[in-house]
Amino acid sequence: MNPNLLHLVRIAQQPVRRIIGLMSGTSLDGLDVALCRCEGSGLHTRVQVEHFHTVPYPEAVKNQIRQVFARAEISFEQLCLLHPWIGHLHADMVLDCLRQWQVAPTDVDCIASHGQTVYHAPHHQHGRPDFPNATLQLGDGDHVAIRTGILTLSDFRQKHLAAGGEGAPLAVYGDYLLFSKADEDRILLNMGGIANFTYLPGSLQLAGIFSTDVGPGNTLLDAFTQHHFPPLSYDADGALAAQGQVHEALLAALLDHPFFQAEFPKTTGPELFNKEYVRQAQQRSHCPTLAPHDLLATLTQFSAEGIVRAVERCFPTPNLTVYASGGGMHNPVLMRSLRQRLPHCRFTTTNELGILPDAKEAVLFAVLANEALAGTPETFQGGQPGNPAVSMGKISFAR
Ligand SMILES: Nc1ncnc2c1ncn2[C@@H]1O[C@H](COP(=O)(O)OP(=O)(O)OP(=O)(O)O)[C@@H](O)[C@H]1O
Ligand SMILES: CC(=O)N[C@H]1[C@@H]2OC[C@@H](O2)[C@@H](O)[C@@H]1O[C@H](C)C(=O)O
């Protein structure tokens, strides 16, 4: 038998696995690296984050990715070169983290690598009848495995697509395994580039659980901060938005898109919510030249409103605990708006659940890899609409 298979079986049979979860989201701010101690599997999974770091992307890296990111037309050569290049980059970032943490690569069982999403095209977005839901993440797992010497699972979203999902949000799988709690209705709200949430009913009924994108999180805030206030890359602490006024007509135009009326679960990305989307809404609401601070105030309210409307639509009298995570939870203007508009909800962060909010998505991929190695798709029974019962991740041996 190929010794790689024996190695794989040995890791799968261990009571505890050390797995590095990697996530690079739509904000292009950097690579989240979480070294996790994963014990057990399925509903018995226990995760302890041993180390976490976001390795920031240098501007030159962001510019390479931006050449293809969320663009319908690109250089094929650039796309082809980026796939191994991002694999190398992420592998080197992992090795740097391990050096800093004084952990030997041989003491890590596996890397769970999400890669970099460069294009997300669910059917409702591309609208082409002959084509399925599609999504593309770069940073090939073989390159990560060979360069780090660590077994790597990658490309988690394709199996989800193949089994009938939109390739996202995958958060529901990890949230269900780690955070379900009897007698507490929970929302796990992640505000990254795009905002999404998972609903975990206190009844623990699998049928009630779902996860959905709800609209933009920080993606538009980042885009317009970079446009109007270089060299700033994001509106730190909402300081710019706090100086502006919400333009109600523009807010209404921004919210006037079929995405917000579509049934849950659904997914989206900067392919839809981008500068052109805002420009068109400005035209429709007769404010083509809004002051930048007012624009940021309005866009922050737009992010909040997308979240609020989705929560209200799912739960008419929301009496829930909201566990926030992702970069948006650091924006007090956004958080204030959410608290005001959802007064029946108790707001806290995933810290209360023992997971560092900034690490949550990287931990998710460690949990998905742990399930692929040691779990069974049956944990998710028949799956939920949009969330098929499958194990995800392609296996790349390190030799
Ligand atoms: N102190 C802060 N004040 C305001 N915004 C912040 C702050 N810190 C981080 N952010 C926002 O959070 C973003 C990064 O969030 P995060 O890392 O969760 O996104 P991501 O993982 O790339 O996104 P996705 O969820 O789409 O995968 C930054 O680009 C910025 O907009
Ligand atoms: C295609 C893609 O990369 N989607 C991301 C993105 O970032 C947030 C939101 O949009 C979410 O749907 C997803 O990531 C998280 C980790 C998820 O799948 O749950």
Image: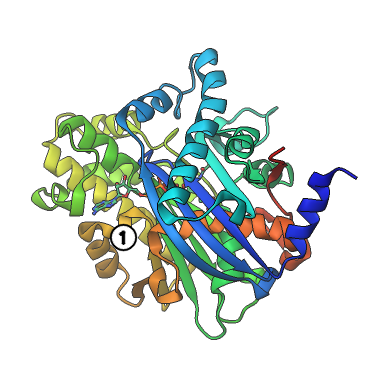
Quadrant where the N terminus lies?
top right
Q: Residue 97: image x %, image y %?
A: 43, 48
Q: Amino acid at mark 1?
A: Met
Q: Is residue 82 above or below residue 344?
A: above
Residue 280: % across, % down: 31, 30
Residue 78 at least partly seen:
yes
* 79 or 147: nearer the viewer: 147
Residue with the most extreme right position: 1
Residue 146 placed where, x, y %? 63, 35
The image quadrant of residue 84 is top right
Left or right of residue 173: residue 117: left
Q: Is residue 386 above or below residue 222?
A: below
Q: How many marks?
A: 1
The one nearer the camera, 391 or 344, is: 391
- Reading the image, the residue beneath label 1 is 329
Residue 210 image-quadrant placement: bottom right
| The C terminus: image quadrant | top right
Local secondary structure at mark 1: helix
Horizontal relation, residue 332 to residue 374: left or right: left
Q: Residue furthest toward the left?
A: 243
State whether residue 237 is above or below residue 68: below
Tell me the quarter of the picture where residue 294 sits: top left
